[in-house]
Image (cartoon, coloured by chain):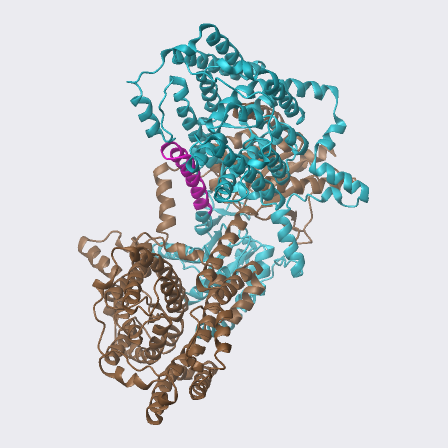
Chain colours: A cyan, B brown
Amino acid sequence: MDRSSEVQTKEMDSRSMSSSRHHALNEPYVHKVGIPPKQNLFKEFKATVKETFFHDDPLRPFKDQTRSRKLILGIQAIFPIFEWARDYNLSKFKGDIIAGLTIASLCIPQDIGYAKLANLDPQYGLYSSFVPPLIYAFMGSSRDIAIGPVAVVSLLLGHLLQNEIDPINKVEYRRLAFTATFFAGITQATLGCLRLGFLIDFLSHAAIVGFMGGAAITIALQQLKGFLGIKRFTKKSDIVSVMHSVFASIEHGWNWQTILIGASFLSFLLFAKFLGKKNKKFFWVPAIAPLISVILSTFFVYITRADKQGVQIVNHIEKGINPPSVNQIYFSGDYLLKGFRIGVVAGMIALTEAIAIGRTFASMKDYQLDGNKEMVALGAMNVVGSMTSCYVATGSFSRSAVNYMAGCHTAFSNIVMSGVVFLTLEFITPLFKYTPNAILAAIIISAVLGLIDIEAAVLIWKIDKFDFVACMGAFFGVIFVSVEIGLLIAVSISFAKILLQVTRPRTAILGKVPRTTVYRNIQQYPEATKVPGVLIVRVDSAIYFSNSNYIKERILRWLTDEEERLKAASLSRIQFLIVEMSPVTDIDTSGIHALEELQRSLEKRDIQLVLANPGPVVIDKLHASNFADSMGENRIFLTVADAVASCSPKLVEEV
Amino acid sequence: MDRSSEVQTKEMDSRSMSSSRHHALNEPYVHKVGIPPKQNLFKEFKATVKETFFHDDPLRPFKDQTRSRKLILGIQAIFPIFEWARDYNLSKFKGDIIAGLTIASLCIPQDIGYAKLANLDPQYGLYSSFVPPLIYAFMGSSRDIAIGPVAVVSLLLGHLLQNEIDPINKVEYRRLAFTATFFAGITQATLGCLRLGFLIDFLSHAAIVGFMGGAAITIALQQLKGFLGIKRFTKKSDIVSVMHSVFASIEHGWNWQTILIGASFLSFLLFAKFLGKKNKKFFWVPAIAPLISVILSTFFVYITRADKQGVQIVNHIEKGINPPSVNQIYFSGDYLLKGFRIGVVAGMIALTEAIAIGRTFASMKDYQLDGNKEMVALGAMNVVGSMTSCYVATGSFSRSAVNYMAGCHTAFSNIVMSGVVFLTLEFITPLFKYTPNAILAAIIISAVLGLIDIEAAVLIWKIDKFDFVACMGAFFGVIFVSVEIGLLIAVSISFAKILLQVTRPRTAILGKVPRTTVYRNIQQYPEATKVPGVLIVRVDSAIYFSNSNYIKERILRWLTDEEERLKAASLSRIQFLIVEMSPVTDIDTSGIHALEELQRSLEKRDIQLVLANPGPVVIDKLHASNFADSMGENRIFLTVADAVASCSPKLVEEV
């Protein structure tokens, strides 16, 4: 290219120029900047792949083991139950039994309600609390998570499914639900197997807080149907449509009996929650309050026959455990693709929730959670679930917290819960016939209110304003438009933040902290003083194509600003520009080009470029690209202090 | 949320625990970590917006000026010609005239060829070298760029257009071309006005090198049609289809006369190029060689009437300057959207090329190029161009280099070139009738060969392997599939690199460099020694949601590795973990959570967390989130050396 040859001549000029200057800079200095030993390409590649996909070193326990031991370790890796079951004892058993019974009492009424959020019959909620927890208990590595259907995923799934099929077509709708569940499981397991678990990290904490809060309010609003006994209700989930439905139905009359039942039991539930929060000893009160409400209200409706006065009741829950549903999954046709798409979205969200919960409790008890293994477990449980009439199950915030507080020790509490659900399905379901829908609505409202985390939002506001925008974007997106749009907004803002970070990194002017040889940001340390004749700039990011040009221009602007200031104060001009490279962890070809351009500009202004403390990768690339040679290796120093020390003698001469 | 209240109690525990420990750590230390003065929210927001969109401080010259002066400055800002024209003098004029004539002689034959790449009649190439350079000369801020149609954009435009309309439908095809040009201009101007110029930085240098190289080969292959005199040729651009066409046409016979003319003049052009490269004095030889070839070959064909022997000739170029084409742009209907889509893609690529050229030459002469202003200029010129029968014009690599070497001083050389093109259109076009197509093919081949930058590719390989993958991805994508796919691959890989960077940042173990108080990466400085009982980890990136969890786990893994090593060697255990935060430029809520979780894990292992040198933003957020208080402010130090000094006394007690 004509251009590149031209650049080369220019470079050669600069090389000869700088070499003539080196003599003036030939000061002794203590330590050279280390150049790491040259690694061969394959090793380097292996290291990168390992750090990206296997940073948790999953094969470490297998090292230096016999073959049979490796087999046992392998089985234990896939089924952690064989690991923890060996140390299982009575005290753990006691804790797990109590925790299991507590979460079972909480999950049964929730399940019935959540199934309605997904537009499915109530028994499907219970089914999903029977098979998946069993599978998870064998394969999962979290000790505290409680598995089953959850509010947000149920809402999301219901919403996505009804966009494709009207829930009135029960059979097809259900088949699509199983298809979506199947692919949600496949997605989760695949991400785990391919060790792509880090993808879920791209949904930021702030976005999740906003999304969850918005989803909670949307779910609570949806419950107004059951809570007020409204018959005709919108299918949309945004707040405007819902409130329109609510107020439009006033004239048709709300059902006061329904409202009375709902309101009184909601007060009871909220009071129980308040009690549980106030005193940790009473953690079981909010945990069993829903079941008590169901029993009391069912009994009350049964004896008063309130259903004849328009109080809507559950009416019928199929008796017996999960029927098989393999043959109902769409493995071909139009709905295959639709189910796949819905499954991927629902699976990712379910995964995000489960991993967030798993990590929270793992850090509380200080054990490591293998994210990728966890995904395989969740995936397997949903795949099996889809074949046994379950819809997407995951870890539930509220039930996991109860599980933890009730003193669970292992995933055995999930087996206990599953057992109770089994008994319920086999024997008790007919008793739910007279359970008023208003109670289920009240239970869901009280459950999802916990997802609105105002404290977290306040903290986000305090810590990071941009995060807060992401949080509110997701929140209002969910409330005013739809769950998908809220999710899309959350992901987009999260990405925008990453891109902004790599496009506009920070730079800082450094000064000497008095009585030390330490150079720090003068904005942060106002007592730090600039060195006359020297401008020290720190670049706070890897220099990549996305920011190399900005960094170059920003450094030149710092220089221009400083020069103007010095001129106005008639002080001596800048002769050295020291770039502190400590935070520059990497540099690419565009970055090298930017440095070359920077040096060329500086030469025109008769200023010398000096580098301080480039990291191993950077110094390596500076050498590979010949930039280190062309600028003069003796202008690269270990510390800013060394660099300044080497510049000073030259300065004295001139001033 | 049940969970969050639980977390809170835990935190309170940790707070009381850590405060009881502080006494042991109550060493004097020289400097506190500075907390920058609290800024108000609006100021902070303003600063962020300014740094993101107005980092070049475009309004600076307007400060403290009178009203009339501001008006003049404003006009000069939009039309830089009014600025540089005032200092214009005879010596500059001489340089510009020579440069302008040289690039004119180069552009005329190129234009005719490039128009064919875009499936347009030859005069449209000339039109595009008449109006756009004029507009640019008034509005552009680069002094060296030469404006006109370029090979890659012509190919891309032609390819995208023929996907929508068969070029046989000349009128509609042309209308769509103008529509695309219009929207390309709008896109460019909009990006400039909204100051979103940084978006083009997301196409990395490596990706551009690969894309350009691939496009060059594709273009050269397309020229085989004219070069070999093949009549039936594929419309696809991938190498497989093209080679198939070439070899399938052997039996129909290539035209030996055509090949003879093409080959001999291609040799001449390449020799001229070689001569120009060898000796900078002869830069004008390759610049005027194309025009000489055209003249000689046209004359030759005219006297031998070789066109009767099957040598294809240009035949007809419309005489006269650009007809207006406003009324031909599709402002409604189906083609509006298609034109818009094509325009956006072509506009972005044209922009990337122009800005890259502008920056290269600006850095050679050390003047600042305002990227956003430049985009407005390019946009305006294409919008006006689309109304005067031009297709997308931009800065040309080869002609700009010639312009620079011929000694241009200002954009006036573009006006000179434009003038020559005007004269050509008015008077000389009929003379091109007998110009053989093979010559145009030879000129294009020799021009695009310069775009294949093998040296740059080698350098990229040396510097950054990942960049090289992006480069090759784009290259092979263009060659084997299509221009769009190559572009898509380039952008995707570039993005993947950014995401990888923020997901898997580097961490390093630090040791003390002997006879200093400097702590550095022990991999880079093998002579650096670890401090017994203390593990020092440096985190080399901002801690964000996308990497917070990885960083936490990675630090814990460093710790586990080190503990195992110490245990094996029966050395004293680790008691302090110092996290060097210098490169941590920012932290978000997820990052704070990760730190909290890290501290909780360390407490379980009876290890104290100590932070060294958090930056201004980080320390601010550590305080805002109360993490600084909960971990103990006296465990945050200015330097690693201070932190180690404060840990050591405690260590001595225990060991």
| Residue at position x 56%, y 38% in the image | A182
Q: Nearer the viewer, residue A298 or A136?
A: A298
Q: Position of residue B645 (x, y in %)?
A: 63, 39
* Residue A512 left/right relative to B367: right
**Does the image show residue A209?**
no
**Does the image show residue A71?**
yes
Q: Position of residue B90 (x, y in %)?
A: 26, 78
| Residue at position x 35%, y 40% in the image | B43
Residue found at the far top of this picture: A303
Q: Main secondary structure of the magenta part?
A: helix
Q: Look at the image and tell me in which quarter the C terminus of chain B lies.
A: top right
* Residue A228 left/right relative to A18: left
| Residue at position x 60%, y 16% in the image | A427
Q: Nearer the viewer, residue B195 or A451?
A: A451
Compared to residue A521, the image places residue A237 above or below, namely above
| Residue at position x 22%, y 66% in the image | B325
Q: Position of residue B301 (x, y in %)?
A: 35, 90
Q: Reply yes or no: does residue B367 show up in magenta.
A: no
Residue found at the far left of this picture: B68
Magenta segment: A472-498
Q: Reply yes or no: does residue A486 show up in magenta.
A: yes
Compared to residue A643, the image places residue B558 above or below, namely above
* Residue A595 left/right relative to B25: left
Q: Nearer the viewer, residue B219 or B570?
A: B219
